[in-house]
C-alpha cells in the first residue's frame, strides 16, 4: 500500500488566485490516491475567510479528499500555519506543504509525492529551484539574486550545503516532524531553515529535488524587509543550535 500524504496549503489573502491551482492539485492527487489536502486560512480577515470557505466548499463537491479547512483566528505567519495543520494530523505517513500561488505546478507536486513514496525511511524531500537540463525556472532576476545571497548566508552560517531552502514545496515523514516539532519556534518565512536544521540535527536525511518553477505575480514577500527578518532568524537558529551542541 502506498504511504499516505497530508498536503497543507498555507494561505494569507489568497482567495484571488488559489481556485485554479487548487482544482488542478485536487485532480492530480486524486489520480495518485492516498492524499488528503487541507487549506489553512491564516487569519486574513472575515471577508477573506468567507470567500475561502466558498471556494473550498465548491471544490469539495467533486474532490472529497479536500478536507475541511483550518481557519486560524489570527495571522501566525506561513510557518505557524503549516505547523498548526501538521500538528493536527495524527495518521498520515507524510506531512507536506505547497504554496498557494501555483508557482510549483500540481504536476510537480504529484511527482514529488511519488518520489517520497519511493524514498528510504527517515528522508525528507525539499523542492529546489535549480536551473538544469529538463527543468524550467522562471524567476525575476532580483528575487533570484536575493535568493542566492540568502542561500549562501544559510550555508555559511549554519554549515549546511543547501542550494534553495525557501522553495514552497516540502515533504517530511510524520515521525521525523514529531521528533523535532518541540524545537520549532520560528513562524515566519525562515521557518523552512529551522525545519531543515532540526531535521538534519535529528538524523533525518534531507534531499533537495530540482523542480520546474514559474513565478506567479501577487506574492506577499516584501524583499527588503523580509530579507532582513529572514537573516535575523538565521542568526537565531545558529545561536539555538550552538546552545544545544
Image (cartoon, rainbow, N blue to C red):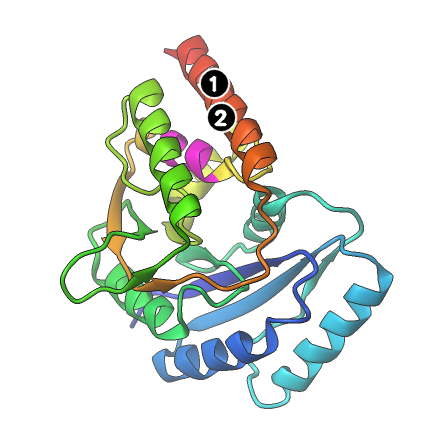
Task: Using the image as rendered, state which of residue 217 and residue 71 is in the foreground.
Answer: 217
Residue 218 locus on image (x, y percent): 59, 60
Main secondary structure of the magenta stretch:
helix
> Is residue 50 depicted above or below 148 in this figure?
below
Give the residue drawn at x 25%, y 52%: 130
Asked if residue 51 lies in the magenta stretch, the reply is no
Give the residue drawn at x 62%, y 49%: 81
Residue 176 locus on image (x, y percent): 38, 42
Q: Which residue is mark 1?
A: 235
Region rendered in magenta:
192-198
> Is residue 8 depicted above or below 225 in this figure?
below
Compute the Cα span from label 2 to label 1: 7 Å
Give the residue drawn at x 28%, y 32%: 203
Question: Mark 1 packing: few (<14 Cα in 10 Å), some, or many (20+)?
Answer: some
Residue 186 locus on image (x, y percent): 57, 32
Asked if residue 197 lies in the magenta stretch, the reply is yes
Q: Secondary structure at mark 1?
A: helix
Q: Is residue 65 visible?
A: no
Amino acid at each position: 500500500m502506498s504511504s499516505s500524504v497530508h498536503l497543507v496549503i498555507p494561505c494569507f489573502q489568497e482567495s484571488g488566485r488559489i481556485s485554479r491551482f487548487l482544482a488542478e492539485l485536487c485532480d492530480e492527487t486524486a489520480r495518485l490516491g492516498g492524499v488528503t489536502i487541507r487549506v489553512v486560512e491564516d487569519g486574513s480577515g472575515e471577508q477573506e475567510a468567507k470567500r475561502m470557505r466558498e471556494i473550498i466548499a465548491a471544490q469539495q463537491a467533486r474532490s472529497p479528499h479536500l478536507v475541511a479547512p483550518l481557519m486560524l483566528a489570527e495571522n501566525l505567519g506561513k510557518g505557524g500555519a503549516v505547523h498548526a495543520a501538521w500538528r493536527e494530523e495524527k495518521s498520515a505517513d507524510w506531512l507536506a506543504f505547497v504554496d498557494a500561488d501555483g508557482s510549483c505546478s500540481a504536476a510537480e507536486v504529484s511527482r514529488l509525492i511519488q518520489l517520497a513514496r519511493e524514498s528510504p525511511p527517515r528522508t525528507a524531500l525539499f523542492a529546489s529551484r535549480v536551473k538544469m537540463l529538463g527543468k524550467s525556472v522562471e524567476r525575476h532576476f532580483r528575487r533570484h539574486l536575493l535568493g542566492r545571497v540568502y542561500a549562501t548566508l544559510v550555508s555559511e552560517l549554519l554549515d549546511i550545503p543547501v542550494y534553495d531552502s525557501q522553495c514552497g514545496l516540502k515533504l517530511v515523514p510524520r515521525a521525523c516532524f514529531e521528533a523535532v516539532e518541540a524545537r520549532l519556534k520560528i513562524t515566519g518565512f525562515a521557518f523552512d531553515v529551522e525545519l531543515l536544521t532540526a531535521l538534519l540535527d535529528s538524523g533525518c536525511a534531507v534531499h533537495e529535488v530540482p523542480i520546474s518553477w514559474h513565478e506567479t505575480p501577487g506574492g506577499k514577500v516584501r524583499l527588503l524587509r523580509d530579507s532582513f527578518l529572514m537573516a535575523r532568524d538565521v542568526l537565531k537558529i545558529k545561536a539555538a543550535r550552538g546552545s544545544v551542541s
